[in-house]
Image: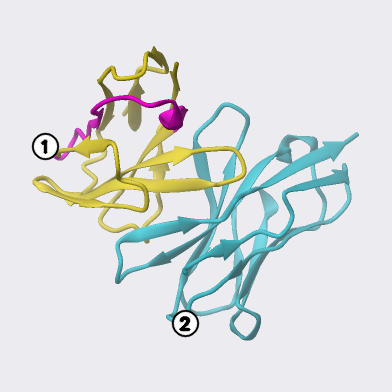
Chain colours: A yellow, B cyan
Amino acid sequence: NAGVTQTPKFQVLKTGQSMTLQCAQDMNHEYMSWYRQDPGMGLRLIHYSVGAGITDQGEVPNGYNVSRSTTEDFPLRLLSAAPSQTSVYFCATSQRESTDTQYFGPGTRLTVL
Amino acid sequence: AQSVTQPDIHITVSEGASLELRCNYSYGATPYLFWYVQSPGQGLQLLLKYFSGDTLVQGIKGFEAEFKRSQSSFNLRKPSVHWSDAAEYFCVYGSSNTGKLIFGQGTTLQVKP
């Protein structure tokens, strides 16, 4: 089992470009989420999903879009990248709920110039 | 506003010394509380969690934490620190009602030889 995988590991964008961060899991988990990690701020929830076809906003959703067409995949889309979106992005999954043990991917380091 | 506070941004301890990392939360509901650890360049891993029952919980790697409702605290402890414990530690609050997790700012632990 691969667990939680994220691609790419590193990405550099120019302001205004769009891109998709990929997250995939092979644990048949219902709950998936995206966080961004910035120095001194811990992890902040961007979007989450409690199952295929269901998504909801987290703490910092602006500028990001998600969809959940399958149980396995939960891509995060940056619509028009801004320097403020420079961060490390983590995908996490759990069996059913946010209060179950979270399994984190290795992260994607994104720089927006 | 809902918050989780880790008062110590950075802690340095000598190898073999005891460790206590502090965490306070500001919610009234019965919380789910977690400690996660992040080694440099890695994703996060669950150390332990509390949601009911015995207020002293044991985790992996010799860590334990005590839930004190009267103090709204969930401090993490280890009797003897090893060099491999150097990492960033996050206290996390969860609620089954909201479907979201709230992370503290994190405490970076440095271990001196």
Q: Secondary structure at mark 2?
A: loop
The answer to whether B27 appears left or right of A18 in the picture is right
- Identify the residue position indicated by label 2 in the image: B28
Amino acid on which disc 1 is placed: Thr
Observer able to see residue A107:
no
Q: Residue at x 36, y 18 (%)?
A: A15
Corner quadrant of residue B26: bottom right
Q: Residue at x 32, y 52 (%)?
A: A58
Look at the image and say whether residue A81 sits in the magenta stretch.
yes
Locate the C terminus of chain B by quadrant: top right
Relative depth, front residue between A71 and A84: A84
The answer to whether B35 appears left or right of B9 in the picture is left
Q: Residue at x 37, y 26 (%)?
A: A82
Q: Residues within 10 Å of mark 2 (few under 14, many from 20)?
A: few
Q: Residues within 10 Å of mark 1 (few under 14, many from 20)?
A: few
- Where are the magenta residues, as a range? A68-88
Considering the whole magenta stretch, tell me its main secondary structure: loop
Corner quadrant of residue B30: bottom left
Amino acid on which disc 2 is placed: Gly
- Tag 2 subunit: B
- Tag 1 subunit: A
Q: Secondary structure at mark 1?
A: loop
Corner quadrant of residue B15: top right
- Identify the residue position indicated by label 1 in the image: A70
Residue reaching furthest to the bottom:
B70
The answer to whether A108 appears left or right of A49 in the picture is right
Task: Residue B62: give x, y in percent of width and height.
Answer: 69, 53
> In this picture, is A100 found above or below A86?
below
